[in-house]
Structure formats: structure tokens, C-alpha cells
């Protein structure tokens, strides 16, 4: 688990992690704009999102408040586990 802080106007680029990983994000303060491939998803304070770690992704803070989020990356070996594109 990682606590990530992004100042207003800041960007953090994520790396695709391969088809056997899911990322879980929970926003504690501020509003996250998450770019997943060609889509943009807004995740607000006290909301969470899970997405497929093999997607190109970028974390943006397009707002005036500091963004604070927790990130968990789950790598799995079981090929029977379904890997969702994303869900809120």
C-alpha cells in the first residue's frame, strides 16, 4: 500500500503492470482524475476504484485542493481470477 500526495496541477504517470495485476485506489482528500487508456474517470473524496493494471494510466489533480490517495497493487498468479477493466 502506498499513500500518494499530488499537489494542484500535478500529474503522476503509472506504468502498465501486466495482465496479472489489479490496482485499487481510494481518495482521502481532493478529487482524482484517472486516465485509463482513452478514458477519463473522476474519483472523489471517500470513493474508490479498481482497474486492470495492464492499462496505460495517469493520475491527475486538476483541482485547487491537494489530492491524497491510497494505492494498492495486487499481483495474482491464479489465471482463473477475472481482471476487470475498471469499476467504481
Image (cartoon, rainbow, N blue to C red):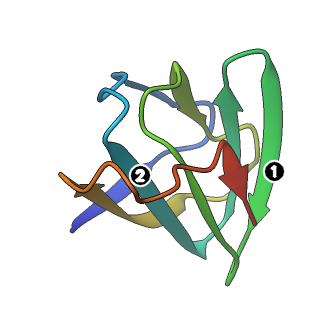
Tell me the element at label 1: strand
- Category of crowding for the residue at label 1, using alpha-carbon neighbours closer than 10 angstroms: few (below 14), some (14–19), many (at least 20): few
C-beta proximity under 8 Å, tags 1 and 2: no
Q: Nearer the viewer, residue 44 or 72?
A: 72
In the image, what residue occupies the spot 31% across and 26% down?
A: 18
Identity of the residue furthest to the bottom in this view: 46
Q: Quadrant of the N terminus?
A: bottom left
Pick whichever of labels 1 and 2 is earlier in the sequence: 2
Which residue: 68% across, 29% down? 35
Q: Residues within 10 Å of mark 2 (few under 14, many from 20)?
A: many
Residue tagged 2? 22
**Marker count (numbered):** 2
Report, in whole angstroms, how far the alpha carbon at label 1 lies from the one at label 2.
18 Å
Seen from the viewer's position, the closer of residues 9 and 81 is 81
Q: Which mark is residue 42?
A: 1
Instruction: Name the quadrant of the C terminus.
Output: bottom right
Identify whether 23 is placed above or below 45.
above
Badge number at residue 7: none
Residue 44: x, y in percent?
76, 68
Where's residue 80, x and y in %? 39, 56
Q: Residue at x 73, y 60 (%)?
A: 87
Q: Is residue 25 left or right of residue 85?
A: left
Q: Tell me what residue is drawn at x 46 percent, y 63 percent.
A: 24
Q: Is residue 39 left or right of residue 80?
A: right
Instruction: From the top left corner, tell me how far across and down residue 74 is, in percent.
Output: 27, 59
Amino acid at each position: 500500500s502506498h499513500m500518494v500526495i499530488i499537489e494542484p496541477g500535478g500529474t503522476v504517470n503509472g506504468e502498465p503492470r501486466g495482465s496479472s495485476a489489479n490496482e485499487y485506489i481510494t481518495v482521502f482528500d481532493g478529487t482524482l482524475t484517472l486516465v485509463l487508456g482513452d478514458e477519463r474517470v473522476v474519483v472523489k473524496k471517500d470513493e474508490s476504484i479498481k482497474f486492470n493494471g495492464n492499462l496505460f494510466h495517469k493520475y491527475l489533480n486538476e483541482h485547487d485542493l491537494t489530492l491524497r490517495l491510497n494505492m494498492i497493487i495486487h499481483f495474482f498468479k491464479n489465471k482463473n481470477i477475472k481482471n476487470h477493466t475498471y469499476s467504481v
